[in-house]
Image (cartoon, rainbow, N blue to C red):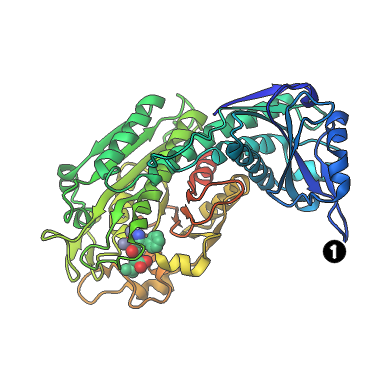
Amino acid sequence: MDTKLLFQDAAGFQTPMLAVFAVDIASGKDADPLAALLTTSDAVTDAAAKVLASGEFKATLGETLLLHAPGGLKAERLLIVGLGKAKALSVDEVRKGAGAAVRAAKPLGVREMAIAFPEDHALSDEHLETLPCKLMSRALVEGAELAEMDWDTYRSDRKDRSVRALSVIAHEAEKLTREEIQEGFDEGLIVAAAQNFTRSLVNEPGNVLTPTELGKRAAAMCAEVGLKCEVHSTKKLHELKMGAFWAVAQGSEEPPALIVMTYEPPLGKGAAKDAPVIGLVGKGITFDTGGISIKPAEGMEKMKYDMAGAGAMIGAMLAIAQLKPKVKVIGVVCSAENMPDGKAFKPGDVVTAMSGKTIEVVNTDAEGRLVLADGLHYAKTLGCTHLVDAATLTGACVVALGMINAGLFSNDDAASDQFQAATKISGEKFWRLPCTDDYKEHIKSQIADMMNTGKNRAGGAISAAMFLKEFVGETPWVHLDIAGCAWNEETKPWMANGPSGIAVRSIVEWVRGYSG
Ligand code: BES
Ligand code: ZN
Ligand code: ZN
């Protein structure tokens, strides 16, 4: 989508469709909804006056109403987009509302549209405190860009329903400065493109996106934005003695890929000897059959998204390369295919991780923690002082948190708090679960340093986190279990079902928090 920011009067803008936001300003618990437009344009207000007065439009989040040939406007259509209750308005509603506007245009075959930047008397000073205009601008662009994507690439009967051009029409005002709107807009484009890149990787089927192919796509992305990228395979895994990663990889005809992407901050900045180095480690299982502990057939096709953590890190690196924070960042992706085979690893095997710790494999389906064990340790040897990993790691996390919050685990309150602060900007939801040492019992093995599952199913997401914790030591670390949030089962008014791109926005923001 060709997305532009224009400072001009929305009523005078010629476009096939102008979208304008509305909120419900009714006060009192049982009051009927009362929709009000977030615009200062009298012409736009007049054009929508009748339909708003009818009470037919409730301004619930994502609700849309289309008017043809709106009087007094240059636009051919006026689309009114609900953002929900005025009192509850946050940047997240702006993100979703912008998405709903784009997704309302797509089935109509509207190729070009405009969205009026939310502004108004309805946005009180109190609102503008919690809705800084830079963040609103950024969220608006993100929502629109994310909404544009549909995942029908492999359908021969797909119809091109893309919105090709979007103009964001803004007005300068006291609390809405041109600079801030522009900055938010520019950031939004970068972050959304990165998240969409992640989504396009996660959408790929396992036969297309093998570990080797993931390595190629990461390398191509890095070349485009000037990141250093190395893609290693079997030989390097052996050289580095990555026995845990190799155990998973050894049962597949597809060779593994160890992808290392490096971002160096602009010279002199963040380059001090004791400056932090951030490591982003992703689980990149391009297909998870479960291995010898094979998964049931039903639903197994979904396990192509078992590389969503890797996808998130590759997307985050793309955004970081362009946002240029003043901190060094190293992305490490451990990619393999988990297959049953004559050469596959087996329950009962004991493997030695790169760190030297021994692992009793109890279940070959708990493979993600094995590849991450070596990825996290390797990131430390590369000099990382702070670590985050993302992984579709456990079904237990989905049982615990459903598909609204992803799981967050950490050995460091400061790093965890900084991550949660980042989610206030990203709008993504993570819920912290414990991984204190009293859970160490879960992974105790009789014959090795640890086993790769819990003793039973209780607290399975925690057992997995405890396992990873063995490999990060004292290094501040945040672990994101995104199994429940990486794939949206249902289409929302603002987003197609399929890969969500969860964690990209939060990780990018978390990294920026370490910018020197
Ligand atoms: N990739 C799965 C986890 C998963 C489950 C992701 C559902 C997305 C949706 C992971 O490798 C796995 O199979 N974990 C096992 C661990 C168990 C054997 C200890 C699980 O969660 O069942
Ligand atoms: Zn598995
Ligand atoms: Zn898996």
Determine the image quadrant of residue 480: bottom left
* Quadrant of res 102: top right
Check disc 1 and report the residue beneath it: 29
Q: Classify residue 501 as left or right of residue 62.
A: left
Where is residue 408 shown, x and y percent of the image? 49, 59
> Residue pushed farthest left?
342
| Residue 146 in the image, given as x and y percentages of width and height | 55, 40
Q: How many labels does the image show?
A: 1
Considering depth in this image, is 341 or 78 the residue closer to the camera?
78
Quadrant hosting ligand 1 = bottom left
Disc 1 packing (10 Å; few <14; some 14–19; many ≥20): few
Q: Which amino acid does label 1 sit on?
A: Lys
Quadrant position of residue 262? top left
Q: Is 99 on the left or on the right of 240, as rendered?
A: right
Residue 88 is situated, as x and y percent measured from the top left of the image, at 76, 53
Q: In this view, does 436 lie to the left or right of 4?
A: left
Point out the residue furthest to the front here. Answer: 157
Kindly tell me whether residue 87 is visible in this rendering.
yes
Q: Position of residue 317 (x, y in %)?
A: 43, 37
Report the residue at 27% width, 63% height from top: 290
Residue beneath the point at 41% across and 73% down:
439
Left or right: 245 in relation to 91: left
Q: Considering only vertical position in the picture, is 390 above or below 68?
A: below
Above or below, 99 against 393 in this view is: above
Label 1, ligand 1: CB separation under 8 Å: no
- Helix, strand or loop for disc 1: loop
Q: Residue placed at 68% from the left, 43% from the top?
A: 94
Nearer to the camera, 360 or 181: 181
Of the 4 image quadrants, the one containing the N terminus is top right
> Could one spot residue 280 in this view of the protein?
no
Vertical comparison of 254 with 364: above or below:
above
